[in-house]
Image: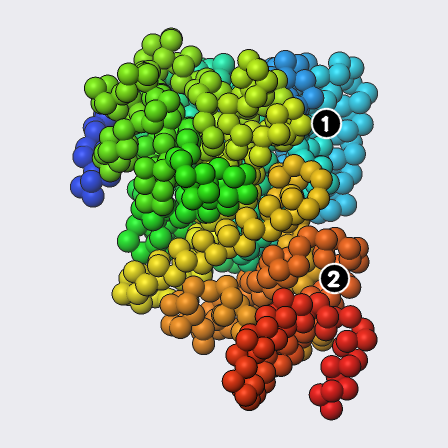
Amino acid sequence: SNAIPQAALHSILSVFNARNLDVKRTNLNVLEDPTGNGTVTMIRIMFNFAGEQPDEADLDAYLRVLERDIKRLKWIDDSTLDRALSSQNTSHQNQEANMLRAETLSALSGILHPLLSQQDYWAFSNTSIARVVDDSRYCRHSMGIADLFLARFDPKGPLGDARYHAWIQALRNDIDQDVEELIPRSVLHKMVDVVEATSRTNLFLTERYALALRLDGSLFAMNPKGLENQERDELAYGVFFVDGRRFKGFHVRFRDIARGGLRLVTPFSEEQYSIESARQFKETYQLAFAQQLKNKDIPEGGSKCVVLVDTVSASERVANPDKNLLMRKSVKAFTDALLDLTVIHDKDPAKSGIVDILNKDELLYLGPDEQVIPEDINWIIQRAEERGHPSPSAFMSSKPFTGINHKEYGVTSEGVQVFLDTALREMGMHPNTTGRPFTVKMTGGPDGDVAGNMLKILAREYGEDALVVGLADASGSAEDPEGLDAHELARLVREERAVSDFNPALIGPKGILHSSSTIEGQRARNTMHNRVVADAFIPAGGRPATINEDNWNAFLLPDGMPSSQLIVEGANLFITPGARQKLFDEAAVRIVKDSSANKCGVICSSFEIMCSMLLNESEFTSSKEHIVEDVLTRLRQLARLEADLLFKEFNDLPGALPHFSERISVAINRMTDALAEALDTPEGKEHYESLLALVIKDHMPKSLAKKSASRMESLLPEQYLKNAMASTLASRIVYREGVQYVENQTDNGMLAKLAFRYLEAEQYVAEVMKSLDSADWKGDDAAKASAVAMLRHGAVRSYLTEPMTRACEDASK
């Protein structure tokens, strides 16, 4: 279905020609799909064997392979097909192997480009890697590597470990002895590395939409340049790579149970595609790590998917495909391939078609990100249900009607506003303090999620005290130093229109409207975030590394002052780590990092998934209004807790805000990991009930807890529940006590013990406060209030000191 008829016919006839089949008659019809899902292309072919005909005993098997390969044509690149058809081995029994080898080589090459191009962008381009793989000089090596991969994961009889390791060593020895040039040798050895890092693949599934590999994080140990210090030592827990027709995608996660968005990248030129391909893994890794930092408040670790869609390649037979159709097909193929490797119903490879070297069940949790639309979300959830996923609605969040749509409720922007508000107060720019409006500029369109909702929230929270002086998106930019018309901005948001749709008549005398349809307009749009002067800048859209180490000084005015004193990162990775530090060192710019500022989106997704696991659809929809209200309240609370701690640490200690943002995340995540592991110990089991009560009271939205608290242990996965307990206690402690409370304890085992003692101390103090509250103070309410306040602010810390602990224990006897 939804194939391009001419391209489909061309590919099929190419296969017939390569297999020496004589086509006698062809009939092609295109029919409307009665389900409303586009069209169905029907092709009928009558043929004879022009050369050697298979024996009658082999004929059925030959036709099954032919049928399978024809079905695969819809889902593989033309370059992969050409590679399969160019094989010199054209005997009937090797036709299937030719196609599988070609797909394997294409996938390995796709992984190699973002890996090797970090060493040398020009030496390891897509073209140079393909040249090595297909060159007759090195072909026997690349084909040998592909054959090793096929043998290792053949479900009919997978290659045993001893023969596998011997084969690897033989391949490496042969490469070293035969290949003298550095680039081909590096490519071939890295291909072997990829095979060794693979623990699962769907290569032998007959109905797959794309080729997927589950890879070990150690393959990517040489992390991309420019990452934060903590990132250099952090290996990904697991990586999935999917290679399909005109797309390739990475999924990176940093914990077994992890959550993160799926985004599509659609370059506008072949040159841009090459650039995006080279940095695809780096971008996915950085986004996933940023997600790991921001996921500190929830049970899931951080993950991210980046799917690079080729809408421009002239090497394909359809040079200008329907972009939207291609994006929708890429989403389907990518997510279905992930399901191939995570929803495995039979451990017997002969039955499942999957050789599982990892030998461990894995569940992924996705959410929508850039260019993913409701149609995609619905299809993914429905497909997960069809494939037997244990919790389809948990596989992809934000399902319309039965989910919590981020754009509809502005969940990410609600958190951004809390950090903005706190920063304005701390920097003396809040209108309540100054008595005058503050100015703000933003990247991202009124029709977008974060930018559009920020415009609504600014109007709600500040009214005329917030002036938007600059706004830019893909369509253009609008600027006015006296503030863009608030009613017109509201109209654009309401009607989901772009910046270029701003009514020119409503631009003030000092303002200007630029359209990206002109070179001048593109230049103005691309520099708006640097040129326009405002109190605060909110990146709420735009590509990663827009402000980087090479151009950060463009953010400064001619007198060396920054065009904005405050930046609150609503968009991920808009500013590189080095640029953040430069802006702080040279111009004292306060930057609230993305992992803090926009964390509420993923927290909302986590709550939504918890709802999907604890409530049925009717229960959720009947209580949705109350649940959403409670979720928004909890999001603002979590944002406020971190914002207050962030600026407290910044004011008390030397360093830039991003430094403290990371320290907060690392401290919470470290304590969470220590607690999650300790929950399996006898001491951890003693605190199980107390921690479960803490999750219900402190973490869950009230209306959800009221409806489902009694079901948690039976419906939530065991490790998920343990992670929820651990993250709830860890974030509670760090937000109350600060990062040094965790950093001062270097032993993770002792860190868990400290957390358990903290929980005990809180329980003891709560009992004391309860007794004080019920005691007769003989009308002295002031003394009572003072005593309670002293206990609330210092009693837990006091209890944790050894002498005080003993004194309290003696007093309770």
Within 10 Å of the Cα at label 1, are there few (<14), some (14-19), or many (20+) other Cα atoms? some
The quarter holding residue 592 reads top right
Which residue lies at the image location 71% right of the left edge and 17% below the top edge? Answer: 183
- Expressed as whole percent of the image width and height from the top left, the position of residue 740 reads 72, 53
Q: Secondary structure at mark 1?
A: helix
The N terminus appears in which quarter of the rendering?
A: top left
Q: Establish if 281 lies above or below 703.
A: above
The quarter holding residue 693 reads bottom right
Which residue lies at the image location 26% right of the left edge and 35% below the top edge? Answer: 490
Amino acid tagged 2: Leu
- Expressed as whole percent of the image width and height from the top left, the position of residue 124 reads 64, 18
Amino acid tagged 1: His
Q: Which residue is mark 1?
A: 189
Which residue lies at the image location 52% right of the left edge and 39% below the top edge? Answer: 428
Find the residue positioned furthest to the bottom: 813
- Expressed as whole percent of the image width and height from the top left, the position of residue 595 reads 55, 42
Find the residue positioned furthest to the top: 519
Q: Which mark is residue 751?
A: 2
Q: Secondary structure at mark 2?
A: helix
Position of residue 181 in the picture relative to residue 434 (left or right): right
Residue 785 in sight from this viewpoint: yes
Which residue lies at the image location 49% right of the left edge and 20% below the top edge? Answer: 530
- Expressed as whole percent of the image width and height from the top left, the position of residue 242 reads 51, 36
Within 10 Å of the Cα at label 2, are there few (<14), some (14-19), or many (20+) other Cα atoms? many
Front residue of 620 and 357: 620
Tell us which disc is closer to us: 1 or 2: 2
Decide which of tag 1 and tag 2 comes sooner along the chain.
1
The quarter holding residue 275 reads top right
Q: CA distance from mark 1 to mark 2?
A: 42 Å
